[in-house]
Every structure is written in C-alpha cells, then in structure tokens.
Image (cartoon, grey):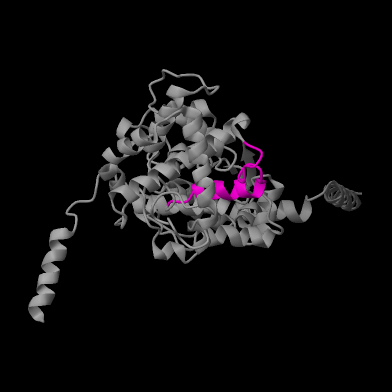
Amino acid sequence: MEEQHLEKLKNKLKEVSTVLSADCCIFRVPKRLREGNEKAYTPQVVSIGPLHHGEKGLESIEEHKILYVKDFLERTKVSIDDCFNTLKQWEEKIRGYYAVTIDYNENELVEIIMVDGIFTLEVLLRGSFETLQKKNDRIFGKPLMHRDIIYDMLLLENQIPFFVLEYLLSLAYATSFFPMEHDTAHVTGLPLIKLTHSFFKDRVYIRPLDEIICKLGQYSESRRILHFVDFVLKCHRPPPFDPPPKSKLQTLTIPSATELHQAGVKFEMVKDKNFFDIQFDNGILKIPQLKIRGSSEVFFRNLIAYEQCEFYDHYINDYIFIMDRLVDSAKDVELLLKKKILESKLSDKEKVATFISSLNSGPVVFSKKFYFTDLCEKLNAYYEVPWHNWKASLKHDYFSSPWAVLSIIAAAVLLVLTFVQTVCSVMY
C-alpha cells in the first residue's frame, strides 16, 4: 500500500508542469476576494473561454453563440477548417494564458476558443455597426441582455486571449468591408483596440481613444494587451515609462470627507482627469468625479483581483482604499454628491457609503509601496493643525450666512460705540 502511494506521488511529479507560462494572465479570483460578492466574479449570462464553460445557468446562450459563428463565417467567407487549424497551432500558447489547469483536450479547447472568440468579436462588431444587427438578435434586441453581456465580458475569469480576437478580426478585415480605417500606426492590433474602446468606454471610465493609443504604444508588443480586463487596467494605469512615486504609508488612518470639511478643507471636482489624479494643495482637495453605476462593482472588483493576481502594481486597490477612508458615512456621501465628486444611481446615500466600503473588504493594502502616501500625509498634517479647526468652527458658527455676518458687524459696532461712550463719560 505504501509503495502504491509513493508511485502515485512519483507520477504526479512527472506530470506536473515545471514552469508557469510567461503568458499566464487569466486567473481564478482568490477566495478571499470572492467572499465579498461571488456574483461580481461569476458570469450570469454567457461563458467566454474554458473556465466557466458548460456551467449550469449559462446554457441558453450557447445556441445564440453558434448563430453568431454561422453569420460570421457566411458573411466573411472564412473557412472554418482553416480557422480551427490555425487556432490549433496556438493551442499550447492559448492554454498557457490560463493560470489553472484546463481539463479539456486539445480539440475541445480549440473549439471553445474559436466559438467564444467569434461570438465575442461579433458582439463588438454589432455593437459598433448597427447594420450587422438582425431583427431576431437576442442580445442587441434586448437592452438588458446587452448590458449583462458587457458585465460578463469584464470578468477576470471570463476572458480569452486578445491575440485570438486580433486574428479573427484580421480574417474579417481581409474578406469583408467594415467602415473602419486601415490604420498604419505603430500600435499592433489598432482596429481591435478601437472596437474595444468604443464598446466599453461608457462603462469603465476610460479616457479618449487618442490618449489611450498613446499610452498603449509605450508597452512592449508582447505585453501590450492580453485580454479585456488587461486592456481596461492598462487604460487606467499611469504610463509605463513615467510611473508615479510610491512610498511607505505610515498610518492607515486619514480624516473622512466631513471631518476634513469641518477643518476647512475645500472640495473641488476636476474634469477630464484619470481618477487616480487626486491632489491636495493650499487647503483644496481636488478629486476626479466617480460615477457609480450598475457596472461599477464588477469593474472595480475584477480589476483589483487582476492586480493582486498579476502582482505588478496596485493603483486601483490604493484608490479604493483612499475613497473608503474619505467616505465613512452617509454625511460624507452627501458632501461629495453636493460637490459633484460623486454621481450615483443608487437609491440613497447610505447605500453609496456601504457600496464603497464593501469594495475595500477584501483587498490587501501594500503599505510599503503605497501610491497615495504623499496625499495621506498632507491631509493628516492639515487636519492636525488646531487653527484650521478653530477657523472652520468660527466660520461655521458665526459667518455661515449673510444675516449672521450682519449680526456680528452690528454687535461689533455697538461694542465700539459703547466703548467710545464710556471713554467720553470718563473724560468729561
């Protein structure tokens, strides 16, 4: 019996892969993060790629996938044999993109990737060109289905390699007409980048296309875009050749928005900025607007999960930490809504505060390399100066309205006149 166990162990050691692929970039979300909200990481309508393929509740869209594949092949005149065989040559590379063991054999995996890849590309194309949409289209004919598909396409576990989509688009490009310019710019895969940007831009806070193309051009070709979540994260990260400084965070505590306001800090919403660009100078805290909508939780949770699995940097993680410290209660939400720093579709202010707090329940703060250390130190230093609190209290209690100011002036004039009258009485 002991020899059998030992022999099994030896076989396992022979079979296990010795080195993770350098392309590994599609991960299972850690349990620590999933416990915050399982649904935020799990596809609700469609599986894309092998990790959730065939799961219960996702079967109804499979027939529609095949219809999309059929339409694509008929419209582009692409040979299904050629497409399948080309992808089969890349099977090992495709498998290496996933950080977990894929149980499907070679042909099964290639079929999943081909069907899901064509389906995904068709969603992008039909989202950009209404002429490709059909009357019986279950996705674009139903706005709620369309929205749910977008959410599922932003899940870390629901990705396929970007280079597969680039290959499929090249087939469509070579054999059919789309009203897109054939760019010769230096960014590889530019037509697909344009499609992706157009499809997601209203859901994931990304900057204008020209700015994104410039930023992506700074990445090496092999690491430019790996999948949709990677695309969104790279859109938000600072440029790779100009990273902002990081330093050790001395304390995890900073005043809330209300506390800072009571200490005299002025809040300003800034437009046309990356939402990392929070600045504090001369008593003014400038914060880019955060729009909280239906896709916000999926967006933030999956980017944080990708950051922590990839372990390259953690800008999104640090941003959520700062926002969670600023928003501690419904009063903080009310203040930031009034200043238009927050814009929310949630029904009440308490839910907004709870939502932001829930995003920070799973992530780990990397305090030795924190992005907002300088901001935290400035806010704490300002708040700890007693004069700032006294000045704010004086303004709040005695100069909060024109009538209060007039009352103070009248009282001061009366006091001066009384003093003059007293002096005159003594002298004469």
Does the magenta-highlighted stretch encompass residue 138?
yes
Residue at x 44%, y 30% (from the top left corner): 169
User: In this view of the protein, can residue 82 be seen by the observer?
Assistant: yes
Q: Quadrant of the N terminus?
A: bottom left
Does the magenta-highlighted stretch encompass residue 170?
no
**Up/down of 304 relative to 74, above or below:** below
> In screen coordinates, is 57 left or right of 258?
left
Q: Quadrant of residue 224?
A: top left
Residue at x 57%, y 35% (from the top left corner): 126
User: In this view of the protein, can residue 313 be seen by the observer?
Assistant: no
Of residues 387 and 112, which is closer to you in this image? Answer: 112
Residues drawn in magenta: 134-156
Of residues 87 and 247, which is closer to you in this image? Answer: 87
Q: Where is residue 11 shown, x and y percent of the image? A: 13, 65
Q: Where is residue 315 shown, x and y percent of the image? A: 43, 46
> In screen coordinates, is 254 left or right of 267?
left
